[in-house]
Image (cartoon, rainbow, N blue to C red):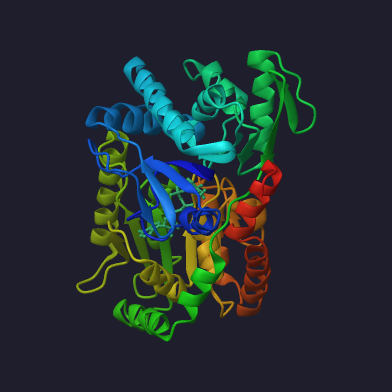
């Protein structure tokens, strides 16, 4: 039985060192804690095992669960709706039923490993019913929940079938964390609208308990990025990258995203195409590298996005390219952390232009990598990161002209202006890294 339990869709094994894992692994390890989650492979449930000092407790998903709970309800119903409905949210009753059954399975697994009075931290939109289910099974636990994605405005949330179940599910927690203060307010307003509760400030009474809803903006493992950026081999790779892209080329623009329609990749490429067309940049002086990690490729909307992006990349390269020299390099690949940092170091302009994003860690990684105080960040207003990184070139990604304006402003800015902006952004990112984020959440939850 464990005093501290993390519950997340995925286990912290074989995923590369991501922010969440590096933030939670040390705390989980030092408290002799457990991690409840899915291995990522359907139809398997290995026996619990130890991994880097953490007790790993696998939960099984059948192939049908993956279809319905993961690709269906989580990624085709909740994900688009919570991102402003930028793609239509699809609703199917069997998906909802599977979501509920899988959430129950996670809650039971957590209940089985948590010691009396333990702290359980549940993560993200795939598991919103878990806090309520776990509370019923184990009223003795301290339960925290953190939502990594945006929480939508009340009017949008109201479209979700069985919406009240989700609100009750979250209210099972003692502390519900969001990326942004507005998200916490949206949630509290819903408790009034759907359940007639009366929140006061960030607290609301529910079934004789006090539930707190508050923003805890997530961050990155700054020292991990900083060490990679200081590594001579990574710096050499950055120089080689620039050389390979045509050393004479003045300007390297970069995009790094999961291939997701919320990330604004097609709008970004469209804006770049227009800059080439109207002569603001030319194939002689600029190159855009877009790295897009394959993601959720069995979901139709993601396949369609892939086709749209690839068509547009082909069009732009066909129209503006030359033999041996393309204005746009599109890599539909995942890259190692070291390769990403080399790209960050090489890039003059980083384009982070999602239509909606809970936080966006790529923006923070770019800033953390720029120990040289070089480079420029073009950042969408609709990311959580924009609240902290106000010295970026902020843009409205829905407005192609505004995207072009932001990119042009970054191109035109002088080195002193850029260094001053980067210095301020680096201070902000350094002051709140992911370790601090986890510590603040757990302190607020009251047991660490
Ligand atoms: P994501 O939507 O996945 O996360 P993001 O915050 O940018 O978005 O994190 C992506 C991570 O994957 C970054 O660490 C990045 O370096 C890495 N990555 C991206 N493209 C890659 C590539 N081609 N190769 C290798 N690695 C790549 C969700 C929410 C976000 C929120 C995070 C954390 O949607 O809003 O910031 O969770 O809470």
Kindly identify the residue that appears in the image at 39 percent across and 41 percent down: 37
Q: Quadrant of residue 44?
A: top left
Q: Is residue 356 visible?
A: no
Horizontal side of residue 239 vs 314, given as left or right? right
Q: Is residue 165 above or below residue 269?
A: above
Horizontal side of residue 341 vs 241, given as left or right? right
Q: Position of residue 361 (x, y in %)?
A: 51, 56
Kindly identify the residue that appears in the image at 59 percent across and 59 percent down: 435
Kindly identify the residue that appears in the image at 53 percent across and 63 percent down: 221
Q: Is residue 281 above or below residue 43?
A: below
Horizontal side of residue 295 vs 167, given as left or right? left
Looking at the image, which is closer to me, 59 or 373? 59
Q: Position of residue 121 (x, y in %)?
A: 55, 41
Looking at the image, which is closer to me, 359 or 405? 359
Q: How many marks?
A: 0
Q: Position of residue 155 (x, y in %)?
A: 59, 22
Q: Is residue 312 above or below residue 237?
A: above
Q: Is residue 426 visible?
A: yes
Q: Position of residue 338 (x, y in %)?
A: 39, 72
Looking at the image, which is closer to me, 445 or 354? 445
Q: Residue furthest left?
A: 323
Q: Quadrant of residue 234?
A: bottom left
């Amino acid at each position: 039985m464990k005093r501290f339990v993390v519950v997340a869709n995925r286990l912290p094994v074989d995923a590369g060192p991501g922010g969440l894992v590096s933030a939670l692994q040390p705390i989980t390890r030092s408290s002799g804690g457990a991690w409840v989650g899915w291995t990522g492979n359907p139809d398997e449930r290995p026996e619990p095992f130890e991994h880097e000092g953490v007790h790993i407790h696998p939960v099984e998903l059948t192939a049908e669960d993956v279809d319905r709970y993961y690709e269906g309800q989580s990624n085709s119903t909740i994900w688009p709706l919570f991102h402003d409905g930028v793609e239509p949210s699809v609703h199917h009753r069997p998906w909802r039923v599977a979501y509920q059954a899988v959430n129950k399975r996670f809650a039971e697994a957590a209940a089985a490993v948590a010691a009396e009075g333990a702290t359980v931290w549940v993560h993200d939109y795939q598991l919103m019913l878990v806090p309520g289910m776990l509370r019923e099974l184990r009223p003795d636990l301290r339960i925290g929940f953190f939502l990594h994605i945006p929480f939508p405005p009340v009017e949008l949330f109201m479209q979700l079938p069985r919406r009240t179940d989700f609100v009750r599910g979250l209210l099972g927690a003692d502390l519900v964390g969001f990326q942004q203060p507005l998200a916490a307010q949206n949630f509290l307003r819903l408790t009034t609208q759907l359940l007639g509760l009366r929140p006061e400030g960030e607290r609301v009474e529910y079934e004789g308990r006090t539930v707190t809803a508050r923003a805890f903006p997530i961050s990155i493992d700054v020292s991990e990025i900083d060490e990679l950026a200081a590594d001579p081999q990574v710096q050499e790779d950055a120089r080689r990258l620039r050389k390979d892209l045509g050393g004479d080329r003045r300007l390297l623009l970069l995009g790094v995203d999961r291939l997701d329609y919320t990330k604004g990749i097609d709008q970004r490429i469209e804006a770049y195409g227009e800059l080439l067309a109207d002569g603001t940049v030319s194939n002689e002086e600029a190159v855009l590298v877009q790295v897009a990690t394959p993601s959720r490729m069995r979901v139709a909307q993601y396949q369609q996005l892939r086709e749209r992006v690839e068509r547009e990349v082909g069009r732009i390269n066909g129209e503006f390219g030359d033999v041996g020299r393309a204005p746009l390099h599109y890599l539909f690949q995942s890259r190692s952390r070291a390769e990403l940092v080399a790209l960050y170091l090489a890039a003059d302009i980083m384009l982070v232009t999602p239509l909606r994003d809970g936080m966006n860690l790529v923006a923070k990684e770019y800033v953390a990598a720029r120990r040289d105080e070089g480079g420029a960040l073009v950042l969408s207003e609709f990311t959580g990161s924009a609240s902290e990184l106000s010295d970026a070139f902020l843009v409205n990604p829905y407005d192609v002209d505004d995207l072009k304006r932001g990119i042009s402003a970054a191109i035109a800015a002088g080195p002193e202006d850029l260094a001053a902006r980067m210095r301020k952004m680096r201070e902000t990112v350094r002051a709140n890294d992911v370790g601090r984020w986890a510590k603040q959440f757990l302190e607020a939850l009251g047991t660490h």
